[in-house]
Image: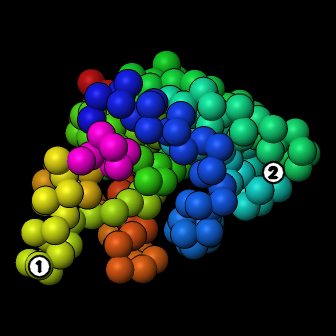
Amino acid sequence: MQIEAVKAAYRRYAGIYDAVFGPVLQPGRRAVLEALRCRPGDRVLEVGVGTGLSLPLYPSGVKVTGIDVSREMLDKARARVTRRGLNDVEALVEMDAEAMSFTDASFDKVVAMYVVSVVERPQRLLQELHRVCKPDGEIFLVNHVRSDNPIIGAVEKGLARFSDKLGFHPDFELRELLDPSHEIAELSRINFFWKVMRVRNGVAHRRFSG
């Protein structure tokens, strides 16, 4: 998907996102926050932070930076941080996740919730996630992936032509993009459509930062 199409989609969603998508997607946010097992002092990057619905879920003492391409969504996230007094949120920055300005190995953990199937170049995004994560750090993904059920898979393939309007790729398959050196584990299935997955950084970080 083109970045301008993504921005346009989330410009449309910004005003209703919390009410419409918040309850549906919040179980995934809670599941990944439990899986993170953050400790005080950890630096976490949340890619696609949106309106900041997940920010109150981080434990005290965990330093969180959030990025998003949608200015309208970030405005709501900043208002949430102020309203809730979330002092551990270090920054909320408008930034393209496929070309992040952070230095290598900046974060202990990297989280991308509902993002990988939205960007124009998913493989480039994964490379950037590995680059900014510390060696032997962990990357957590919450995402829809293409169903193994042939009937549902066919429906998802048919919907793919409307990706720009939907704001994501309904026929996305993560494993096709992963290097064999990536160790991926499905931690939990949120519901029929969404999964929480962990990718260990390790060797992949050294490959992509070189």
Vertical comparison of 181 with 82: above or below: below
Q: Which residue is mark 1?
A: 151
Residue 23, horizontal then vertical, whole percent: 62, 69
Residue contact at pointers 1 and 2, CB within 8 angstroms: no
Q: Residue at x 20, y 57 (%)?
A: 159
Q: Is residue 28 left or right of residue 52?
A: left
Please state the extent of the stretch shown in magenta in the rendering. 162-168
Q: Is residue 29 visible?
A: no
Q: Of helix, strand and loop, which one carries label 2? A: loop
Q: Nearer the viewer, residue 167 or 165?
A: 165
Vertical comparison of 178 with 45: above or below: below
Marker disc for residue 61: 2
Q: Quadrant of the N terminus?
A: top left
- Residue 100 appears in which quarter of the rendering? top left
Which amino acid type is shown beneath numbered disc 1? Ile
Residue 139, horizontal then vertical, whole percent: 44, 52
Q: Residue at x 81, y 38 (%)?
A: 79
